[in-house]
Image: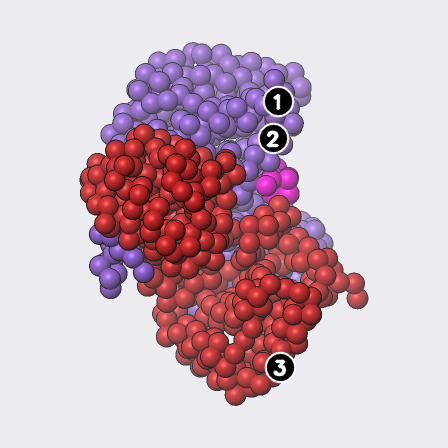
Chain colours: A purple, B red
């Protein structure tokens, strides 16, 4: 069989298995999720052995330390993956939820109910814990999943999927609801991306390059996730103590994540007071500031170019600019923001209201760190990714975002 | 300027105009919609003159009578278009609706609110009334619209858009919220379909060929609409009087629409009683039956091929088959349905429950005609189309389906 046949055959098995899963009760799904969690721990040695192969290959290939750290699994990380599956078991089942319902004037009963998509394709990089997370979220939302992790984690992912499939089967569900995409070449990803009709939705999770290539090459509908060029704007009426705290948190709390701040805008009216404080505080935390002329007058600040306004650093770097007014801040964000999360610091109700209304991003925050844009922080309990597109889902995606709906119409021989 | 430049320039004007429209109050939008309705009537002569050109061209080109009928505008049809705009003015404004909201454990206020997409592209065929409908629905949902009707209606559409733009401008909104796509070649449609980032969503409305080509060629996210290979299944426990009424209504009430029935499945247990009745009743209404062996034993029934199971006739034709059981009916629908609307006739609660759970279509109906799958019938007040895809919207799309959402997070210096 060709790789095309292999991938489409896997998708077809997923489609058939998804039909059974769509009819599974919440109790069946939760029992299975607990069995999956248990299996990851009792068969942890297999997973760690697979992971050791990946780590050894990465080290031999000279991968940087931070990449190897993301790749490496430990007993503790396995426990985290298992707990993630148990957490998903504890969440409400989105399938069957009545989104709206009414009785029409003619007596027809109308209900819009949540149903699974069917078959979900996940294309993701490096961290092998995504394999278990995605399997759990897809299972609970009634979707079969085709998993395509990075080839650097292939032994880890293969071991995790083998363990999870056995647990699914032992629990009485069809194991083909969780599958790896066959093949390890780019060709197999390409087949997946072109499998319109076989795969209902593709979710890429990873860097900007990965996401862009999936968006460009897919005929399957895609939910774009996660590129975050996030801004913090300190208004003329900001409380500068709060502003300093929020800027530091948004930039330095965790730098490698999509909701970290990458650009700082400061209103000219507070520049004289705020710049010395924020420059020192950021530099104390080892942050490199790429600043406009106003910022660049401070020692250690690197002059910024347009590239800096566009960059998602994901590191201890921040672009910084002084703006003459709120309009310029809004214009800057309109031009450069990736539409993920942008924050204003202000005590002025009018400025906050304009910022909330005019910034067109998945999350707009007032006097709060961009780091809060997160399924966990929002109370969703689980998150498959953060959508930066406008269709279907926008912002953190929990279980309900992993479903479609159907209309159910009940009559008694009704005709028009 | 090249056609590419022309189309992208129009999209850019739409983007800028959309920003203002997103901030418009409901009162401003409703006033504008009433002005648009009024202008269509007071300047009806201009619209009818444009339409007369299109009709003359179609007649000279030898278009069939039903196409010319769809194309032709009258005073009465103008009044219908105007009333449609007034109806939209009467509907609730989806923009700003709080979809969900809560206060998180740390005191952060979280709200998910509806916001416009921004720029919507409509690609549609023949009927010029879609021009006014789409303009009204997009305006009320806060979206700028780029309209690309069929070239056979170009003079009608140009006249309608000119009238509507003047009314928009006179009402104080930016006229570029309603624009025709520049150019009349396929090249200009192609630019529109590739204008990812400039256009937020494309909605094709028309025949299967149009929709397929938009799905295939677009990099802009698409909402597929309207292809309906709809089934009516008459179960062993059906009330045959109700069944006859529903089959006739679903097939003959209006044949050219996507929610008309195209296939009839009858359980073998009731075939002896039901087939003579339904064959006679359908033939009395001039319906040609394309039947399996059981049906083909009746006079006038044409033997069916697989093509018949796959066909959306949109005419006085129906494919018909006797099935041995519910499972075979479900399997037939799984194989051939376009996922629009499928109905079961049964008094058996168990059969109804299985049909509703297992048929994966936008609308699943029990003891009711497929003709009810319609925004008007569902009480949405306006409909831009019927989505047959699973992402974002499924089934009839009203005003809320023409929006995205954003998260608004309000804190008081909150950090993680």
Please determine if labels 1 and 2 lie on a single subunit: yes
Residue B49 tag number: 3
Considering the whole magenta stretch, tell me its main secondary structure: helix
Question: In terms of depth relative to the viewer, which is nearer, A176 or B242?
Answer: B242
Identify the image quadrant of residue B360: top left
Q: Position of residue B110 (x, y in %)?
A: 36, 55
Tell me, yes or no, whether the two marked residues, 3 and 1, touch with CB atoms within 8 Å: no
Residue A228 in picture, x, y percent from top left: 55, 47
Q: Residue beneath label 1, please?
A: A3
Q: Quadrant of the N terminus of chain A?
A: top right
Q: Residue at x 31, y 43 (%)?
A: B276
Chain ID, mark 3: B
The part of the chain drawn in magenta is A210-219
A311 in relation to B73, above or below: above
**For numbered disc 3, what is the local secondary structure?**
helix
Look at the numbered disc 1 and give the secondary structure of its residue.
helix
Q: Which mark is residue A387?
A: none
Residue A103, magenta (yes or no) = no
Return the residue at label 2: A191
Q: CA distance from mark 1 to mark 2?
A: 8 Å
Q: Residues within 10 Å of mark 1 (few under 14, many from 20)?
A: some
Question: Residue A153's image quarter?
Answer: top right
Q: Position of residue B359 (x, y in %)?
A: 36, 39
- Which element is circle 2 on? helix
Kindly identify which chain the residue marked by label 2 belongs to: A
């Amino acid at each position: 069989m060709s790789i095309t046949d292999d991938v489409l055959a896997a998708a077809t098995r997923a489609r058939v298995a998804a039909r059974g899963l769509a009819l599974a009760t919440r109790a069946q799904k939760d029992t299975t999720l607990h069995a999956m969690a248990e299996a990851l721990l009792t068969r942890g040695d297999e997973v760690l052995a697979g992971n050791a192969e990946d780590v050894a290959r990465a080290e031999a290939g000279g991968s940087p330390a931070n990449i190897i750290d993301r790749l490496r699994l430990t007993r503790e990380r396995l426990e985290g993956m298992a707990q993630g599956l148990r957490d998903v078991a504890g969440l409400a089942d989105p399938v069957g939820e009545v989104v709206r319902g009414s009785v029409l004037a003619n007596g027809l009963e109308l209900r819009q109910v949540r149903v699974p998509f069917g078959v979900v394709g996940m294309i993701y990089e490096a961290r092998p814990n995504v394999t278990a997370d995605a399997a759990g979220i897809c299972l609970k939302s009634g979707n079969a999943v085709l998993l395509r992790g990075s080839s650097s984690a292939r032994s880890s992912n293969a071991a995790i999927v083998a363990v999870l499939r056995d647990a699914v089967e032992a629990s009485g569900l069809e194991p083909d609801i969780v599958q790896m995409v066959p093949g390890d070449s780019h060709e197999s990803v390409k087949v997946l991306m072109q499998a319109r009709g076989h795969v209902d939705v593709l979710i890429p999770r990873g860097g900007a390059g990965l996401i862009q290539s999936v968006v460009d090459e897919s005929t399957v509908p895609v939910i774009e996730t996660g590129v975050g060029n996030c801004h913090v704007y300190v208004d003329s009426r900001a409380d500068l103590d709060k502003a300093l705290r929020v800027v530091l948190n948004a930039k330095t709390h965790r730098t490698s994540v999509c909701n970290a701040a990458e650009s700082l805008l400061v209103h000219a009216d507070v520049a004289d007071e705020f710049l010395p404080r924020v420059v020192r505080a950021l530099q104390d935390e080892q942050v490199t500031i790429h600043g406009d002329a106003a910022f660049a007058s401070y020692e250690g600040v690197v002059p910024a170019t347009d590239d800096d306004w566009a960059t998602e650093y994901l590191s201890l770097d921040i672009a910084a600019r002084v703006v003459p007014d709120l309009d310029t801040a809004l214009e800057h964000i309109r031009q450069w923001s990736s539409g993920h999360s942008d924050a204003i610091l202000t005590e002025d109700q009018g400025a906050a209201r304009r910022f909330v209304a005019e910034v067109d991003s998945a999350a707009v925050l007032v006097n709060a760190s961009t780091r809060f844009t997160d399924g966990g922080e929002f109370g969703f309990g689980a998150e498959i990714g953060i959508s930066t597109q406008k269709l279907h889902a926008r912002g953190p995606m929990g279980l309900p975002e992993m479903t479609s709906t159907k209309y159910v119409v009940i009559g008694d021989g009704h005709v028009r």
